[in-house]
Image (cartoon, helix red, strand yellow):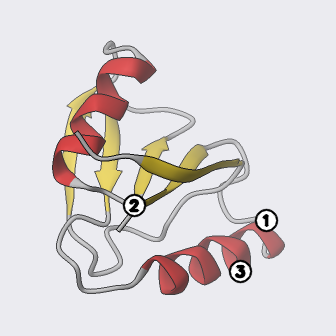
Amino acid sequence: MEKIIYMKKYRTDINGSWGIGHITVDINMSFKEVLEKALEKKAFVIVKPSRGKYWYVKGINGNKTFEEIEEHIENNLKNDYRNKSQCWLINYEE
């Protein structure tokens, strides 16, 4: 299992999959179960939208770096993008 070195929660979302790849997980699963799936995929982001049927585990294809994803999330936060959604940014030990 991957070792997390950083995890931060935000009140925003990422625009679509934003080219970073994603999987969906049933909204009825616990955060712990979703986090386990994210760790399996070494995903950078978990999103729980304010409404909908799914959690989104994003950042699984290596197209964007942790830093690029972090900057994107910070910009969305500043722009008040989907401020009722929640997302967790995750970084791993190399």
Residue shown at the point (44%, 22%) measured from the top left: 31
- Amino acid type of the residue tagged 3 in the rendering: Asn
Q: Is residue 81 left or right of residue 15?
A: right
Task: Please state the horizontal and vertical placement of residue 91, each as a whole percent of the image.
Answer: 47, 61
User: Mark 3 sits on what residue?
Assistant: 75
Is residue 74 something that shows in the picture? Answer: yes
User: Mark 1 sits on what residue?
Assistant: 80
Residue 27 in the image: above or below residue 41: above
Q: Which mark is residue 44?
A: 2
* Label 1 CA crowd tier, 10 Å (few <14, some 14–19, many 20+): few
Quarter holding the C terminus is bottom left
Task: Please state the horizontal and vertical placement of residue 55, each as a whole percent of the image.
Answer: 35, 36
Task: Please state the horizontal and vertical placement of residue 33, each as a whole percent of the image.
Answer: 30, 20
Separation of residues labelled 3 and 1 (CA atoms): 9 Å
- Amino acid type of the residue tagged 1 in the rendering: Asp
Residue shown at the point (39%, 84%) measured from the top left: 65
Q: Is residue 50 left or right of residue 78?
A: left
User: For numbered disc 2, what is the local secondary structure?
Assistant: loop
User: For numbered disc 1, what is the local secondary structure?
Assistant: loop
- Amino acid type of the residue tagged 2 in the rendering: Phe
